[in-house]
């Protein structure tokens, strides 16, 4: 059995093609043309998308999910009732809450709990916003308008309760616009301690 071998000739190239000089000149000409157009063109300042950060700040969109914050009641305590809805909804499992009961002389005793420990690991967080949607008390928000500050230490990315209570919203407020009835309020339609229901 014989095998036929077909010989394919190599395509010939000129000296200029072998040196790649024309192609280098074309690429360099394109880059230099763009450089001068962007630097000295009539719309150069308007079209450039690069920002000199951090000297020049940009305004984030209204729906931007920034770092987390805890909203406060009017007395400065956290609005969170430690229901664990946010930590349950979190797909990254980055929220850790340890609930505690109020003292017996507090009017909130028997109604709700408060977070003794509330931490969010911002390195594990995927900023999906599920925790904000799951919160029935509007206690956790991502409306700060701030991104994560740069750091080289892991502990700077673990936000505790006091840190999140000290972060204001985009409007500068620590409260929320959503109303909340406190226990003992006569207009509160919720649980009645005297009747037990």
Image: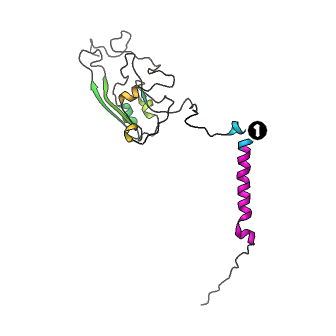
**Picture layout, residue 44 above or below residue 68:** below
Mark 1 nearby-residue class (10 Å; few <14, some 14–19, many ≥20): few
Q: Quadrant of residue 102?
A: top left
Dominant secondary-structure state across the stretch colored magenta: helix
Question: Residue reaching furthest left?
Answer: 104
Rendered location of residue 50, percent (x, y): 62, 40
Please give the name of the residue rendered at 47% of the width and 30% of the height, measured from the top-left corner: 142
Residue 36 falls inside the magenta stretch: yes
Rendered location of residue 56, percent (x, y): 58, 33
Q: Tell me the colour scheme of the image.
A: rainbow
Q: Which residue is mark 1?
A: 42
Query: Magenta residues?
Result: 9-37
Of residues 190 and 18, the one drawn nearer to the viewer in this rendering: 18
Residue 30 falls inside the magenta stretch: yes
Please give the name of the residue rendered at 73% of the width and 59% of the height, measured from the top-left corner: 25
Q: Quadrant of the N terminus?
A: bottom right
Q: Quadrant of the C terminus?
A: top left
Please give the name of the residue rendered at 74% of the width and 63% of the height, measured from the top-left corner: 22
**Picture layout, residue 112 above or below residue 128:** above
Secondary structure found at label 1? loop
Rendered location of residue 109, percent (x, y): 27, 18
Looking at the image, residue 37 sits to the left or right of residue 75; the answer is right
Please give the name of the residue rendered at 73% of the width and 46% of the height, measured from the top-left corner: 36
**Picture layout, residue 82 above or below residue 105:** below
Rendered location of residue 52, percent (x, y): 59, 38
């Amino acid at each position: 059995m014989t095998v036929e071998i077909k010989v394919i000739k190599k395509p010939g190239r000129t000296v200029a093609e072998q040196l790649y000089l024309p192609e280098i000149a074309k690429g360099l000409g394109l880059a230099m043309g763009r450089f001068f157009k962007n630097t000295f063109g009539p719309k150069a300042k308007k079209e450039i998308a690069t920002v000199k950060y951090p000297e020049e700040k940009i305004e984030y969109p209204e729906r931007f999910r920034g770092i987390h914050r805890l909203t406060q009641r009017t007395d400065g305590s956290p609005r969170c009732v430690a229901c664990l809805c946010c930590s349950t909804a979190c797909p990254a499992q980055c929220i850790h809450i340890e609930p505690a009961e109020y003292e017996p002389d507090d009017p909130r005793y028997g109604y709700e709990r408060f977070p003794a420990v509330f931490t969010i690991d911002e390195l594990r967080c995927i900023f999906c916003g599920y925790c904000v949607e799951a919160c029935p008390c509007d206690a956790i928000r991502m409306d700060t308008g701030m991104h994560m500050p740069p750091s080289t230490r892991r502990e700077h990315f673990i936000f505790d309760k006091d840190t999140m209570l000290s972060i204001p919203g985009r409007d500068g407020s620590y409260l929320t616009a959503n109303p909340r009835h406190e226990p003992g309020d006569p207009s509160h339609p919720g649980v009645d301690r005297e009747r037990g229901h």
